Amino acid sequence: MNAPGARSQRLFLALWPGARVRAALARRRDRFSWPPGAAPVPDERLHLTLHFIGEVAAARVPALADALRAPAPRFELVLDNVAVWRGGLAVLRPSMLPDELLALHAALGAALHAAGLPVETRPFRPHVTLARRAAGAAHAGAAPPVHWPVAGYALVRSHLGMQPAYEPLWHRRAD
């Protein structure tokens, strides 16, 4: 587990939902019938990853607030497509990608690169993970989409261990 006093911290940039959106995401997650051994994501860990950064020296973390300054646009993200991807990852994703989401992802990638931090080379596939080890999960059918009024992003620390947890370190709010 990487505690706040650790030499390095495991970080990622994410869209971090407020209480209303988090509840809507949880309702969508709860419409699945999970196979034995599935691991639904707890409510407090539901989010959409923009960039996984990985391990960063703890001494560098305070400066990231300035280094990762990117415009935070306001836009609506509509999550309306459920799927279970190869490897058993159950996800909720948008059918249409807003230009603002793609621009935010690109701007944050450029900021990471300029800060000397890694930028993932795989194509961006925005989604909210609902469960892991979920191969064979069945969704209960049509449900209303989750409308997420995005107004910023967060730098989040991932605590590993027996009880994994995510801790937002700061939020960049839309202007």
Image (spheres, grey):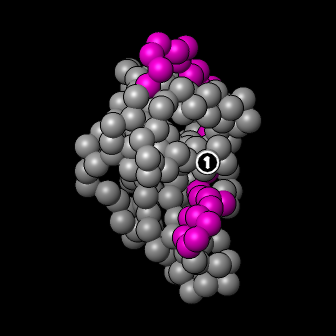
Location of residue 160 in the rendering, given as x and y in whole percent from the top left corner: 55, 70
Which residue is under mark 1? Answer: 42
- Residue 170, magenta (yes or no): no
Q: Is residue 71 left or right of residue 85?
A: right
Q: Position of residue 114 (x, y in %)?
A: 40, 63
Q: Is residue 142 visible?
A: yes
Residue drawn at x 61%, y 48% is 42
User: Where's residue 60, x and y in %?
Assistant: 56, 77
Q: Residue 67, image x and y in percent?
A: 54, 62
Q: Is residue 79 above or below residue 141?
A: below
Q: Out of 135 and 62, give the one closest to the viewer.
A: 135
Magenta span contains residue 145: yes
Instruction: Name the residue at 49% across, 50% down.
Output: 39
Look at 36% across and 65% down and name the residue there. Answer: 118
Q: Amino acid at mark 1?
A: Pro
Q: Which residues are magenta?
A: 139-167
Under circle 1, the secondary element is loop
